[in-house]
Image (tube, helix red, strand yellow):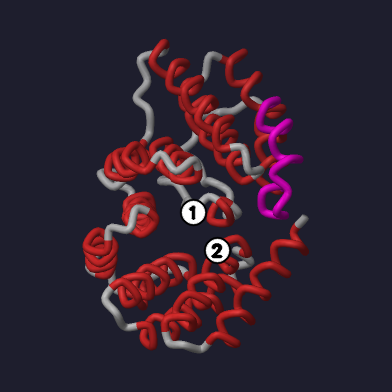
Amino acid sequence: MRRAPAALALALLLLSGCASHPAPPQDDAMEVAISAGRQAMDNHQPAQAIPRFEDANRRALLRDDAPALADIGYDLAAARLADNHPDAALSELARTRAALSLRGHPAPPALDLVAAAALDRLARLPEARIAATRAATSPDPAIAARALFLSGLIADHAGDRTGVIDASTRLDHLAPAKALPRWRQADRLELAARAALASGHPDTALATIRQAIDLRRDDTDYPALRRGLRLAAAAAGALGQTSMAAAYEAQATQSLDAAK
């Protein structure tokens, strides 16, 4: 797949890049629409990205271009999820899979990544786990890493402490931390913080999630930053630091209000 927008790490918990391969000659109008959609996503404007991706999707259908349909279907589903419409994201994924099946083209694992995030958002946790597990089989290390991160989040939402710890351990072993981009470092730190809290070590969790929050800020991944602030609040609360916990919750709320 071509590069996915960096903003996907925003609300999606997705990845900042898909595996690339040499691209065939493309339709200029389609490429302009894709570029405009991805620029809107980079600017945290998924509602503006959606019509651009819809235009690109129509051009891909016109061209009968299966690889483009896979890429654009991913982008469209991710934008709908970032726009807080997980049901619409799942419908988009179903349409993309049907279009690819019609053309005998395999559905890329990145589609499972969006599905896992959408299903998690809808609290359909068993299905979300299955989708994340499928995505983790991707040969693309970025997709596999984000799938493992999602697996840990889903386990945490399900109250599965063992699952959180296992996902964190597997993510740690995937690649040397120093070789990773900021978003992957932040994923590892956030999952490590969740594992520490699940293991009864809120002090470690608080110190670790603070590092992740700084990385999310540097990466302009504000939804993930808010998630980190709420985890910091939970860790502070477990330490009996009620004022600190309330402050972290208030910071997360102010960030969310500023995004509206």
Q: Which residue is mark 1?
A: 13
CA gap between label 1 and label 2 equals: 8 Å
Q: Amino acid at mark 1?
A: Leu
Image coordinates of residue 223 in percent, x first then y, are 60, 60
Q: Amino acid at mark 2?
A: Ala
Rendered image: mark on residue 224: 2
Q: Is residue 43 magenta?
A: yes
Q: Secondary structure at mark 1?
A: loop
Q: Please determine whether, in this image, residue 81 is positioned above or below residue 62.
A: below
Of 180 and 128, nearer the camera is 128
Magenta residues span: 40-55
Q: Please determine whether, in this image, residue 112 is positioned above or below residue 178.
A: above
Q: Is residue 219 magenta?
A: no
Q: Determine which quarter of the picture holds residue 167.
A: bottom left
Question: What residue lies at 58% left-to-right and 56% top-to-bottom?
Answer: 10
Image coordinates of residue 242 in percent, x first then y, are 55, 85
Neighbourhood count class around disc 1 (C-alpha, 10 Å): few under 14, some 14–19, many 20 upward = many
Q: Are marks 1 and 2 in contact (CB under 8 Å)?
A: yes
Question: What residue lies at 65% left-to-right and 20% top-to-bottom?
Answer: 59
Rendered image: mark on residue 37: none
Q: Please determine whether, in this image, residue 121 is positioned above or below residue 251.
A: above
Q: Determine which quarter of the picture holds residue 129.
A: top left
Q: Secondary structure at mark 2?
A: helix
The rendered magenta stretch, by its main secondary structure, is classed as helix
Task: Tell which residue pokes out farthest to the top in this image.
Answer: 102
Q: Is residue 16 visible?
A: yes
Of 12 and 57, nearer the camera is 12
Q: Quadrant of the N terminus?
A: top left
Neighbourhood count class around disc 2 (C-alpha, 10 Å): few under 14, some 14–19, many 20 upward = many
Q: Quadrant of the C terminus?
A: bottom right
Upstream in sequence: badge 1 or badge 2? 1
